[in-house]
Amino acid sequence: MSVEIKICGLSTPATIDACSAAGADLAGFIFFARSPRNVTPEAAAPLAARARNANPALATVAVTVNADDVFLDAIVAAVKPDLLQLHGTESPERLAELGARYGLPLIKAFAIREAADFAALGAYEGLADRFLLDAKAPQGSDLPGGNGVSFDWRLLKSLETPTPWMLSGGLDAANIAEALAISGARAIDVSSGVESSPGVKDIAKIAAFIKTVRDMKTV
């Protein structure tokens, strides 16, 4: 059974091409001004189109943090994403609103440090199409994700949810085999782990990460 791979924080044509060539499943664009990976809807639009043209199977994801309707309208109109990822403190009611407004699959991100943090998922069952489980941001960071830190993957053995979930946080080519073996994840999200510096994706690292996952026979 293959593992679904999302490369997040893309911002250049070359990295789109690298994701397509290496066989990524999802390409993520971050619309959050404080992130070093931030892109505008205008900048992301041709990148999303390039992803669709390069490989129709490469789905595009618009990643937002507590975005209002005006901003989301602009993103959806320009980028035409396949999915929306909500990486802030969006309420279940907000997910219901957005699901009705855009008719797009929703990914809801959660910050995890201990098993008790899984309790927050319950209120979103049936509203989010997928959960993304990321590590809680380290002290001093004002970014909800992309911090290059991981949580204890063993905690996922106690997770009970009917909603498909993705593992995120501190993943790279060196630790992904261990992460998959411990967590049992069937979908993964990587951003800083395929960068040469914050916000600068490394084509070789993208290729190496995806190849490492694809070369694994069993996880």
Image: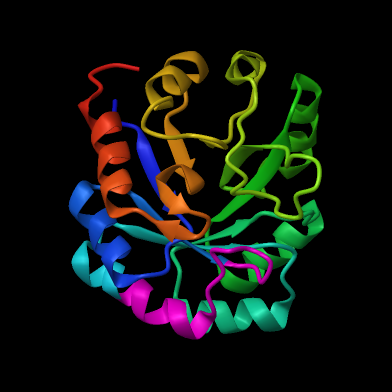
Q: Nearer the viewer, residue 201 or 119?
A: 201
| Residue 123 coordinates in the image, percent (x, y) | 78, 41
Residue at (76, 22) in percent of width and height: 114
Front residue of this view, candidates 40 and 175: 175
Residue 98 left/right relative to 52:
right
Question: At which x and y percent is residue 213?
Answer: 30, 31
> Image height check: is 58 above or below 98?
above
Q: Position of residue 138 (x, y in %)?
A: 75, 39
Q: Is residue 90 left or right of residue 198?
A: right
Is the image coloured rainbow, by chain, by secondary structure, or in one colour? rainbow
User: Dividing the picture into quarters, in which one does residue 219 lie?
Assistant: top left
Where residue 99 sits, quadrant-wise, is bottom right
> Relative to 130, is 45 above or below?
below
The quadrant of the rendering that contains the N terminus is: top left
Residue under the image location 81 percent in, 54 percent down: 91
Return the residue nearer the eye: 16 or 126: 16
Query: Is residue 70 placed above or below 10 in the rendered structure?
Result: below
Q: Which residues are magenta?
A: 31-49
189 inside magenta stretch: no
Task: Tell me the residue at 43%/25% (across/down).
Answer: 175
- Image location of residue 11, percent across then percent down: 42, 68
Q: Is residue 33 magenta?
A: yes
* Count of labels in the image: 0
Indicate whether 203 appears above or below 147. below
Q: Residue at x 35, y 74 (%)?
A: 47
